[in-house]
Image (cartoon, rainbow, N blue to C red):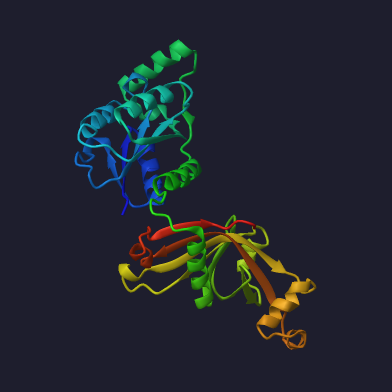
């Protein structure tokens, strides 16, 4: 398992809060303040270092930590994340300095908005800020805002960076593995959402010609679906142990086919529902077509075939 070390270097809490968000989404991670970060990092394949911008003092503790740790071993991949009101000048120089300490590691960078609250500053910090303001002509005042949404966006990017597969299954074999799951199951959990209208619904489905179809009377899942055609679905085996994991997550787009559309009748007929049968029912049956764009598989059997247990396949032609 690839694990990620996350170390934050800050004084007033923003870097720590951002570190926790990144850990949740990047996953397989442990978070430490820089003063208590482990010196034995052998169990971590990658690392994220977050540091708030404090003029000449920026990342001083992180620099000292890296100087000690990187003398023993190198990380495979590292992300350097600055936290501050602006990344225009200070951050690139500090990031370059840290990257030099990291040696041969693959390095990426990111920046997250910080917040300045004068009431939280100690006397020395207030003095430094006033000197900086005098040099730059900027006013001494509160500024910036902690931004969880920005952290989520960065975390998604970093997740892809750290979780890139080493042992990738050929696309055709992976597609066949996904379709085997699709064809041997008939129940999924469908997630739909728009603003506060979120829903996850267990539904019967059938798979045909590259798409999943759900026949339903309606319900609150459509609160999201009529506003947002982006959906996610999960199909999985009951958990019996790590050596038997098998699941498929689907990201794609969904549409409710109108009864007058030509393929509505043809698809319903595949389920034995003739136009006469549908007309005799007490309510209208809605036909939802889900067109996959991405398959994400977690299958323990892949390891025996020489591949990573987690695999992702982008579906072309949709």
- The one nearer the camera, 145 or 249, is 249
Q: Position of residue 225 (x, y in %)?
A: 64, 63
Q: Where does the image place residue 222, in percent across and percent down from the top left? A: 64, 66
Q: Quadrant of the N terminus?
A: bottom left
The answer to whether 222 appears left or right of 15 in the picture is right
On-image quarter of the C terminus: bottom right
Quick one: which residue is furthest to the top in this view?
A: 135
In this view, 85 is above or below 261? above
Q: Is residue 60 visible?
A: yes
Please report the residue visible at 22 percent of the width from the left and 39 percent of the height from the top: 36
Note whether 4 is above or below 119 in the view shown.
Answer: below
Q: Nearer the viewer, residue 17 or 27?
A: 27
Can residue 234 be seen from the camera position used here? no
Q: Residue at x 37, y 52 (%)?
A: 27
Q: Is residue 56 above or below residue 18?
A: above
Residue lying at the far right in this picture: please name it: 260
Quarter residue 194 falls in = bottom right
Which of the 4 quarters of the picture holds residue 119? top left
Residue at image x 52%, y 62%? Answer: 172
């Amino acid at each position: 398992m690839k694990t990620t070390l996350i170390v934050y270097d800050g004084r007033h809490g923003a870097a720590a809060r951002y570190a926790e968000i990144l850990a949740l989404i990047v996953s397989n991670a442990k978070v430490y303040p820089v003063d208590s970060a482990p010196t034995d990092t052998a169990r971590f394949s990658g690392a994220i270092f977050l540091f708030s911008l404090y003029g000449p003092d920026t990342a001083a503790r992180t620099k000292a930590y890296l100087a000690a740790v990187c003398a023993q071993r190198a990380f495979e991949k590292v992300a350097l994340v600055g936290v501050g009101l602006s990344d225009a000048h200070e951050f690139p120089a500090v990031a370059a300095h840290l990257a030099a300490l990291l040696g041969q590691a693959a390095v990426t960078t990111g920046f997250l908005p910080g917040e300045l609250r004068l009431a939280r500053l100690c006397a020395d910090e207030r003095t430094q800020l006033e000197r900086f303001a005098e040099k730059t002509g900027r006013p001494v005042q509160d500024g910036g805002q902690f931004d969880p949404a920005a952290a989520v966006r960065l975390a998604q990017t970093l997740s892809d960076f750290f979780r890139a597969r080493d042992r990738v299954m050929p696309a055709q074999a992976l597609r066949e593995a996904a379709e085997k799951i699709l064809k041997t199951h008939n129940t999924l959990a469908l997630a739909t959402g728009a603003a506060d209208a979120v829903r996850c619904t267990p539904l019967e489905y059938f798979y045909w010609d590259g798409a999943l179809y759900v026949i339903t009377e309606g319900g609150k899942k459509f609160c999201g679906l009529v506003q947002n055609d982006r959906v996610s679905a999960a199909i999985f085996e009951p958990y019996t142990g790590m050596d038997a994991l098998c699941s498929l997550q689907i990201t794609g787009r969904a549409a409710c086919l109108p009864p007058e559309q030509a393929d509505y009748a043809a698809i319903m007929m595949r389920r034995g529902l003739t136009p006469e049968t549908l007309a005799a029912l007490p309510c209208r049956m809605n036909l939802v077509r889900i067109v996959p764009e991405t398959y994400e598989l977690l299958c323990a059997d892949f390891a025996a075939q020489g591949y990573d247990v987690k695999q992702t396949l982008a579906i072309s032609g949709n």
